[in-house]
Image: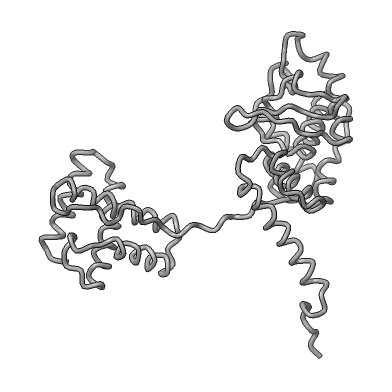
Amino acid sequence: MRDGEWQQAERFLDHLAHVRRLSVHTVVSYRRDLTCLAEFCAKEKISRWSDLRNHHLRRYAAKSHGGGLNPSSVQRRLSGARSFLKYLVKEGTIELNPAVGVSAPRAARRLPTTLDVDQMASLLKIDGDDAVTVRDRAMLELLYSSGLRLGELTGLDLADVDLSDGVVRVTGKGRRTRLVPVGRQAREALKRWLRLRANLADVEKAAFFIGVRGERISPRSVQARVNHWAKRSGLGLRVHPHLFRHSFATHVLESSGDLRGVQEMLGHTNISTTQIYTHLDFQHLAQVYDKAHPRARRRRKG
């Protein structure tokens, strides 16, 4: 890369620091990204920024990823290059930004953690007759029975729960509502909670789950109660409310194989979001296969 070309990069960095007033740390990050781009150009025998083309930037992304950089870091490098080249377009140095439309490789989707059926049964074994314990048992049973999000649970009103029909009306993302079935054990836990709730809340209170002061329970309080019972269960795992949703989806899918039905119960607008649970199901089947199939088991030495 010619010296005059790098001077353009220096002017861009000055622009970031003194015109856009970005932090020193941010400007240092941009400098590092542009240094990487300049090193790539040198290896590719590209001597001017105006010689950069779209396919060069694609190769730059591929080489960065192939060198061990994770997708989010590759995206950051591309973002730095895109901003600099956009600046050069405004300055009239180049006509078009060759980084437009170039994206980093997609990060592999992390599979959600779940509890197996026995672990969930252990977690839901909550004994006690005081109001807080009865309420907590009802919340945890409902989270697992119906796969609710944390905000959906805390947002439930009395009018949303129909125990005679065994359904709850849930308001999810985008203010979309859906009806979700409630299992037998969850219905029993909810009935017990309703009997005690009447002594804790004023008549005009609409919230289904309330705290000890009679107000709607907060998401943070639910998280704390889930953590409390997880420690009491002795599972030795970090348990959070969304883990119940993941476990619900996985267990229903394993039993039914009905991906569309699970999608509707979870309130996913796109079935591709639900399909992650098919990967979990396959992972489980693969483990069973590895343990059981004679061709998959390792032979013992000796």
Q: Residue furthest left?
A: 4
Residue 29 in view (yes/no): no
> Residue 125's spot in the image, x, y percent?
86, 41
The spot of residue 83 in percent (x, y) is 27, 49
Give the image quarter of residue 78: bottom left
The part of the image, by quadrant, that contains residue 263 is top right
Left of 46 or right of it: where is 72? Answer: right
Percent across and percent down for residue 95 are: 18, 52
What is the tally of numbered marks visible in this picture? Answer: 0
| Colouring rule applied to residues | one colour
Residue 111, visible in the rendered structure: yes
Check the picture and name the quadrant holding the C terminus: bottom right
Task: Residue 31: give x, y in percent of width and height.
Answer: 25, 55
| Left or right relative to 138: residue 112 | left
Q: Residue furthest bottom?
A: 302
Quadrant into which the N terminus falls = bottom left
**Closest to the observer, 74 or 230:** 74
Which residue is located at x 68 percent, y 20 percent?
A: 216
Q: Is residue 265 above or below residue 119?
A: above
Image-quadrant location for residue 301:
bottom right
State the residue in front, 65 or 258. 258
Residue depicted at 81% across the width and 36% down the height = 141
Q: Is residue 186 above or below residue 100?
A: above
Kindly identify the residue that appears in the image at 88 percent across and 31 percent down. 128
